[in-house]
Image (cartoon, helix red, strand yellow):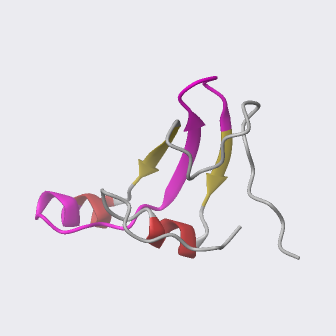
């Protein structure tokens, strides 16, 4: 059985509507964004908008690709 995703003290995971994804890009990612393309972030920090808790930081390539553009189009079952 896969490990459950991290949650904040309110019980929200990275897919909950209260959760904010703070994306961090490298220089190539910013170059892609400035040219109208969708850059892949190098790190994502998830924060709860309700309690303010930072409950997950991810560098997993599957998660990074998943949160590559807005609106978030794909959703994996990766933990």
Q: Is residue 39 magenta?
A: yes
In the picture provided, is 12 more to the left or to the right than 32?
A: right
State the image coordinates of residue 23 (x, y, percent, origin top left). Answer: 43, 50
**Is 5 in front, or is 32?**
5
Q: Which residues are magenta?
A: 31-54
User: Where, quadrant-wise, is the C terminus in this rendering?
Assistant: bottom right
**Which residue appears at 46% of the width and 69% of the height?**
66
**Which residue appears at 72% of the width and 31% of the height?**
10
**Is 23 in front, or is 2?**
2
Q: Is residue 27 above or below residue 16?
A: below
Q: What is the quadrant of residue 5 in the picture?
A: bottom right
In the picture provided, is 59 more to the left or to the right than 65?
A: right
Q: Is residue 61 above or below residue 6?
A: below
State the image coordinates of residue 3 (x, y, percent, origin top left). Answer: 84, 66
State the image coordinates of residue 8 (x, y, percent, origin top left). Answer: 72, 37
Furthest residue in direction top, as rendered = 51
**Which residue appears at 64% of the width and 50% of the height?**
57
**Which residue appears at 38% of the width and 56% of the height?**
25
In the picture provided, is 36 more to the left or to the right than 3?
A: left
Q: Is residue 8 magenta?
A: no
Q: What is the quadrant of residue 60 in the picture?
A: bottom right
């Amino acid at each position: 059985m896969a490990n459950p995703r991290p949650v904040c003290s309110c019980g929200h995971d990275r897919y909950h509507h209260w959760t904010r994804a703070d994306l961090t890009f490298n220089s190539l990612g910013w170059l892609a964004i400035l040219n109208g393309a969708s850059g892949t972030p190098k790190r994502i920090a998830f924060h709860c908008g309700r309690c303010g808790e930072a409950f997950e930081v991810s560098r997993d390539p599957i998660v990074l690709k998943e949160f590559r553009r807005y609106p978030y189009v794909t959703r994996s079952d990766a933990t």
